[in-house]
Amino acid sequence: MENGVAGVVGTIASIVYQLVTLVLFFGPPLGFPLLGLSEGSGMLVGLLAGGTVALLCTFQPLKLVKGRVSTIGEE
């Protein structure tokens, strides 16, 4: 368990990320049939929306710190 403000903020951010991606992945396949649309299109929308957010949350932090990380062999 993390102590301090960084641990609390990290835990909250992780929970929010998991909830958002859960809703984006599983919301459209469950919601589209309720609106009279096909479940297959809901699956496609869920995959695209959830996948896009998951990839964005994976690569965006790496892009933000890329300039501050020294590489091997660099002085």
Image (spheres, helix red, strand yellow):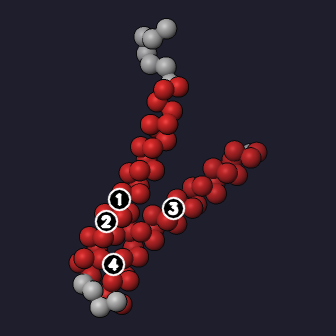
Gap in angstroms between the C-alphas marked 1 and 4: 14 Å
Label annotation for residue 47 = 2
**Kind of residue at badge 3:** Gln
Q: Secondary structure at mark 4?
A: helix
Q: Is residue 2 visible?
A: no
Q: Count residues near mark 2 (Cα–Cα under 10 Å), then give few for <14, some for 14-19, many for 20+.
A: some
Q: Is residue 9 visible?
A: yes
Q: Is residue 50 above or below residue 61?
A: below
Q: Is residue 74 above or below residue 54?
A: above
Front residue of 18/56: it is 56
What residue is disc 3 on?
A: 18
Residue 29 % position (x, y): 33, 78
Label annotation for residue 51 = 1
Gap in angstroms between the C-alphas marked 4 and 3: 18 Å
Residue 31 % position (x, y): 38, 83
Relative horizontal placement of residue 27, taking residue 16 as reference (left or right): left
At x 27% / y 82%, what residue is drawn?
39
Front residue of 4/59: it is 59
Relative horizontal placement of residue 7, taking residue 17 as reference (left or right): right
Q: Secondary structure at mark 2?
A: helix
**Kind of residue at badge 4:** Pro
Q: Count residues near mark 1 (Cα–Cα under 10 Å), then give few for <14, some for 14-19, many for 20+.
A: some
Gap in angstroms between the C-alphas marked 2 and 3: 15 Å
Question: Are the residues at dot 1 and dot 4 in contact (C-beta closer than 8 Å)?
Answer: no
Gap in angstroms between the C-alphas marked 1 and 3: 12 Å
Gap in angstroms between the C-alphas marked 2 and 4: 9 Å
Pick whichever of labels 2 and 4 is earlier in the sequence.
Answer: 4
Q: Secondary structure at mark 1?
A: helix
Front residue of 65/15: it is 65
Label annotation for residue 29 = 4
Gap in angstroms between the C-alphas marked 1 and 2: 5 Å
